[in-house]
Image (cartoon, grey):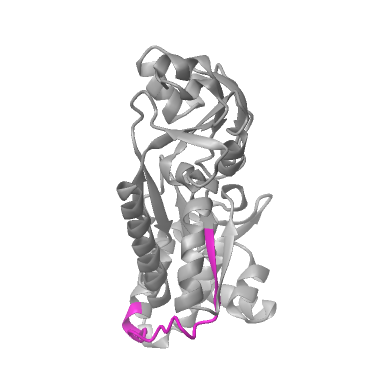
Amino acid sequence: MNISRVDLNLLVYLDVLLRERNVTKSAAHLGITQPAMSNGLRRLRTLLDDPLLIRTSDGMTPTERALELQPQIRDVLANIERAIEPKGLFDASTAERVVRIMASDYAESTLIPALLSRLAIEAPNITLDVLTPSDVSLEDVEQGRVDMLLNRFDEMPESFHQSTVWRDDFSCLLSVDNPLNKKFDLDKYLSGRHVWVSKTGMGASVGMNPQDSQRLGWVDEALKVLGKERRIAVFTRHYLVAAMLSQQADLIATLPSQLARLQLDNPQVRLHKPPFNIPSFELKMAWSPLLQHNPYHQWIRRLVVEIGRDLSSYLSNE
């Protein structure tokens, strides 16, 4: 095959087809008509002597040959984009775009306000679209439909790039009227009624059960090491709701310190260091390999890292 006779636009068509697995959506993504996309698929099938995508009950399913080609095509196009991409031309002050970030409730409450403040100064025409974990699939991120993830992750696809935004520990929030404030030790902690809060993964989850110790997370795992367990009165997936519930006189909320410190000026609550060791954790930023070399994306990643460093430094000095 003489490469000079190959229409290299077909590689772009194939990359989008294998990501969307739908001719209509692929055409819309490329800004061409559906007949033009269908014609491109026919030419690809002839060029590669393979059907590439076969219609099944699950939609358009890639052939084995197509799955073999997908990472190779993606690498080729990424190299071409890097080669022809103008360097240093991203101007944040004039850029107009929507930044889509999947953020946990924890990250949305702590980091997003600071990010929005920086954008107002440095990139006033950029709009944030903050999505919840249940709004987004890993495929959305892989295909670059979502700019980045901000969350705590136990597992992440190896192809994704990731960076640590900050490391955080835990604090306890109690109502100012809670009698446990006096000499707040482990016995007092265990005698209280507790607010459980967490939602770290992607996708909707099923309900919780106090006896399901395998899924209760860091706080309860730390207690289990001591042979102890706490009495959970309420399960919630929203950290700010947990902070609000801690204002009730008989409830204790054990929260990440970055978030708990948002209540420092709240006269209705008191902050305490947990009376037992809870391992710290990392807030991560993750993104698609398709966006790794994009100048705009490099800029927004640097901004998030700077904000994370500043907030982390502020926390350590409190």
Q: How many marks?
A: 0
Residue sitting at x 32%, y 58%: 309
Q: Residue at x 51, y 74 (%)?
A: 120
Q: Is residue 121 above or below residue 94?
A: above
Q: Main secondary structure of the magenta part?
A: loop
Q: Which residues are magenta?
A: 82-101
**Where's the N terminus, which quadrant?**
bottom left
- Between 300 and 287, the one lying in front of the other is 300
Residue at image coords 40%, 17%: 186
Left or right: residue 165 versus residue 244 is: left
Q: Nearer the viewer, residue 307 or 260?
A: 260
Q: Does residue 244 sit above or below 277 in this rendering? A: below
Residue 154 position, x and y percent, is 41, 39
| Residue at 42% from the left image edge and 41% from the top image edge | 257
Query: Per the image, is 91 magenta?
Result: yes
Where is residue 298? Give x, y as percent. Answer: 37, 71
Location of residue 169 by image quarter: top left
Is 142 displayed left or right of 24 in the figure? Answer: left
Foreground of the two, 99 or 114? 114
Is residue 230 found inside the magenta-colored segment of the image? Answer: no
- Residue 153 seen in the current view: no
State the image coordinates of residue 195 (x, y, percent, origin top left).
57, 28
